[in-house]
Structures are given as structure tokens and as C-alpha cells.
Amino acid sequence: TSHWSHVPAAPPDSILGIASLYRNDPEKKKLNLSVGAYRDDNGNPAVLRVVRKVEQEPAPDHEYIPMAGIPSFCQAAVQLILGEKAQSIKEKRVVTVQSLSGTGALRVGAEFLCQFYRPAATTEKPCVYIPRPSWGNHRKVFQSAGLKVSEYKYFDPVSCDVDAKGLLDDLTNIPSQSIIVLHACAHNPTGADPSKQLWKQILQVVIQKQHLVFFDSAYQGFASGDLEKDAFAVRMFEQSGIEMLIAQSFAKNMGLYGERVGALSFVCKDSSVVASVQSQLETIIRSMYSSPPANGARIASRILNNPVLFEEWKQELLEMSGRIQEMRKLLFEALVSRKTPGDWSHITKQIGMFSFTGLNVEQVRYLREKYHIYMTEDGRASMAGLSRETVPLFADGIHDAVL
Ligand code: PLP
């Protein structure tokens, strides 16, 4: 008998499990709105033109890169999120290491927190608070690193918007010096972000309660089309002088999904801790995967560090985010013209790749079985997976499912 005969099958991933049901569906007109990957108006994966251009130049070699990644990439990545003039960068109190995309940044950050975060207020294991709901992988990433995970209120299903009061109350009532995960922009799965005013209030509570913020930035520039606008919250927090962690992903905004390009930054209070933090991050990386992959970070570094390529990238960000916004508008109009019962205005109000449609599990399953339309069972649909051709089909499906 096998050593593994006692091993139970793991439950399928809530997002990737749906994607595999989609793959196995023989229907020709099936539609995959489950995975957060950009598609062009023909429903095909898109490689950015600027990426293709950079790819024309072959890698100088395939040597190992340092444990902490390519320095020019790390610098450019953190400047992108904090802004070139950020005080913390000027004062050399930021540590940045390259990561295996956003997930890897969260995981390495979580490992570090598990080893070294010792809030004075408690002797217990630190607890990470993630929004309810949140990206399905957050809980697993933090738990795997050995951290406790809990939730704070985030979304109000009635208004289909951020539950400002619930959120502020929860952040006020949890133990001080807790670790708080905040989505930098384009909250996944709800597409509902705090207003500027609410961000200010969140910052006040964070300062007052001495919480440690871990920003997850997976959609900078991809949400609004504007890199600066999408970095608003992170920059405001940085300007307040607090310590924080930032996970950055270049999967969506550069379309480098499978290349696994990301960065993890620690914004520290003073530069005296930088060398120790950096060396411990390298130790964690060494034992997990030794060093990160070179190819994607080289591509990203060239785009970020070359003003001409950078401008071309910004143009493509506008095109991608614009197409998604257009899909929102078309879907909204299609539902209004069908007189589909309900208020669908949240579809155009929400931001980023996803719409939290408000459909319930039964309705989502109905869409899958009758219309071969695949979305996650929480009612989240990727707007980037829609095209002018498929919007009417999706609207027909929703109309039928809610009647
Ligand atoms: N965080 C959030 C909120 C996300 O939506 C995603 C991707 O969907 C990620 C992190 C990480 O993605 P990746 O590891 O592909 O960069």
C-alpha cells in the first residue's frame, strides 16, 4: 500500500476549481468570468505591446539573480507605488525584495511577521485581519505561514458598497497592534473601494490603535487607468510616517501573470533596522525558493526604468482599464433595457476587474448549468472576461436567473 493512502483529497480552490469545470465543459459558447485575467475584445489573452517589444531583446544570460531579486526592479517597483518623492525612500528606510508575484510577496511577508512581529500589547500569536469578503487566497496564505486569521467588516450587501461604519467599528474594537490587510485599490472580490474620506478615517484608527498595515496592491493602474490615483491610499499612509508592509503584483497591470513578477516592501520608521530586515527576508527567501525568477522582473524593470517604454505602458493601461469600464457600462445598459428586476447601478460604480453582481449561489449555478457561464459562487464576475459579443448573453442569463 501507498504511504499516502490515508491522504484525503483537498477541496478544490474556490476560483481555480471553477476554471477547471469551465475547461471540461464541451459547450462551444461557454463563457469564463471566474478567473481574474484580462482578455481582449475577442476573448483572447493579451500580451502588452510594450512587453512584446522588450522581449525582442534576449536575456544576457540565465545566471541566478540575487536572493532579493534584481535591484533596479525593486527600486522602480517601490517608487511606482510610493511615488518618486516619497520621504521614506529619501530617508532610506524602505526595504524591497522581489517576490513570486503578489501571492509570494504576501507569503514572504507573512513568514516574516510570524517570526518577528511581537506586539507589546499581547503575548499571543499575532492575528491578521482581512476584509470580509476578501480575495479567496488571503486566508490560506497567512494561515500557511502560521498566523491566525480573522476578519473585519467590509461590504454591505444591501447598498452594494463599503460598510464604512462596520469597518471603522471593527478596526476600533479589535486588539491594538493587530495586523490589518488592506486592498490598495480595486477591492477583490467586491470592486468597492473606500472613499478618500473613509481612507482618512481608516488611517486615523490605524494610528490610534497602532495597527500594522499590510497593503495588498494587485491592481495599480489597472483599476482607474491612472497609476497615481490607484496609489492614493498607500501614499497617504506612507506620508503619515507609520510602518507598513506592501505586496505588489505586476500580474494584471503588465499582463505578466505566469511570469510571477512582484515585490514586497517594508516601510520602516528609521533606517537603522533596514539591514536586519533585509537580511532576514533574504534568509526566508533562501529557505523557501532560494532566489526569484529573472525573466519577468527584467521585463518589468526595463519598462519601469525607461521613460519612453513607461509612457507606452501607461497608454496600454488606459486601454485595458477603459475596455473593462466599457464592459461595465454595456452590461448595465443591457440589464436596464431588459428591465431586469433589481438595481444594477453597482456594476458601473464598482472598480477594477470584477463586479460583485449580487447573484446568489443558486443563481450562479443556474447560469453555469443553463448558460455555460462560469463565475465564482460568491457572485463575482470578471468584467475583463466579457466582450461586446458576450455581454448580451450574460445579460440574458442574469435576467433569466433573477426572474
Ligand atoms: N491580491 C489580490 C487582492 C488579488 O486579487 C490577487 C490576484 O488575483 C493577488 C493578490 C495575487 O496575484 P498574483 O500572485 O498572481 O500576483
Image (cartoon, rainbow, N blue to C red):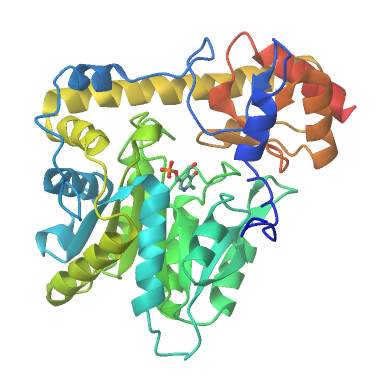
Q: Where residue 46 sits in the image (x, y, percent)?
A: 41, 18
The C terminus lies in which quarter of the figure? top right
Which residue is at the front of the view, 230 or 135?
A: 135
Q: Where residue 21 sits in the image (x, y, percent)?
A: 70, 30
Residue 163 visible to the viewer: yes
| Residue 395 position (above or below residue 141) | above
| Residue 216 position (above or below residue 358) | below
Residue 12: quarter of image: top right
Residue drawn at x 59%, y 78% as measured from the top left: 173
Q: Where residue 75 sits in the image (x, y, percent)?
A: 16, 49
Which residue is at the front of the view, 1 or 262?
A: 1
Question: Would residue 18 be found to the left or right of residue 371 on screen?
Answer: left
Which residue is at the front of the view, 201 or 263?
A: 263
Residue 307: quarter of image: top left
Residue drawn at x 70%, y 61% as measured from the top left: 6
Residue drawn at x 78%, y 34% as measured from the top left: 364
